[in-house]
Amino acid sequence: VEAGEGSGALITARHAFDLNRPVLCVPNAIDLPSSRGSNALLKDSAEPLLSPDDVLHTLKLRAEPTAAPLLDGDAATCWDGIQQ
C-alpha cells in the first residue's frame, strides 16, 4: 500500500516481476514520500489494486458464498450486526 523509494517491498516486487508473477499495487497519494516507490511500481508495470475483485481476477478465482458460522451469544450478535 505504501512503499518509499528504498522499501524492501520493492525488492520483493522486482523479484516477482523477474519470475513473471503478477504484481498488484494500491495507488496512493502522489505527494507523500512514503508512496513514491509503490506509485513508481504502478507506473512501471504493476497492476492497480482497486478492489477485492482485482485480486480474484488476477488469481483467476471466483468468490463463492459461504455459510454463516455457527455462533451464539455476543459473537452471534456481532455477526448479525455486520451482516446488515
Image: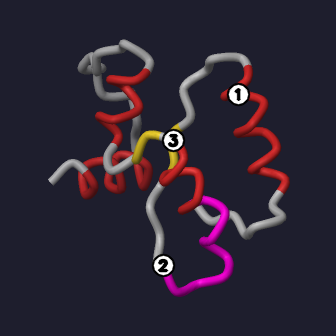
Which residue is denoted by mark 2 in the rendering? 30
The furthest residue to the bottom: 31
| Contact flag, marks 3 and 1 (Cβ < 8 Å) | no
Q: Give the residue displayed 44% in from the left and 18% down from the top.
A: 59
Q: Position of residue 50 (x, y in %)?
A: 33, 50
What is the distance, in whole Å, between disc 2 and disc 1 at their CAs? 24 Å
**Is residue 28 placed above or below 79 in the rendered structure?**
below
Q: Main secondary structure of the magenta part?
A: helix
Please, what secondary structure does the residue beneath circle 2 have? loop
Residue 46 disc label: 3
For the residues labelled 3 and 1, the Cα–Cα distance comes to 10 Å
Type of the residue with mark 3? Ala
Quadrant in which the N terminus appears: bottom right
**3D distance between C-alphas at marks 3 and 2:** 16 Å
In the rendered structure, which disc, 3 or 1, sits on the residue that comes first in sequence?
A: 1
- Label 3: which secondary element: loop
* Placement of 14 over or under 74, stated as above or below: above
Any magenta on residue 31? yes
Q: Which residue is mark 1?
A: 16
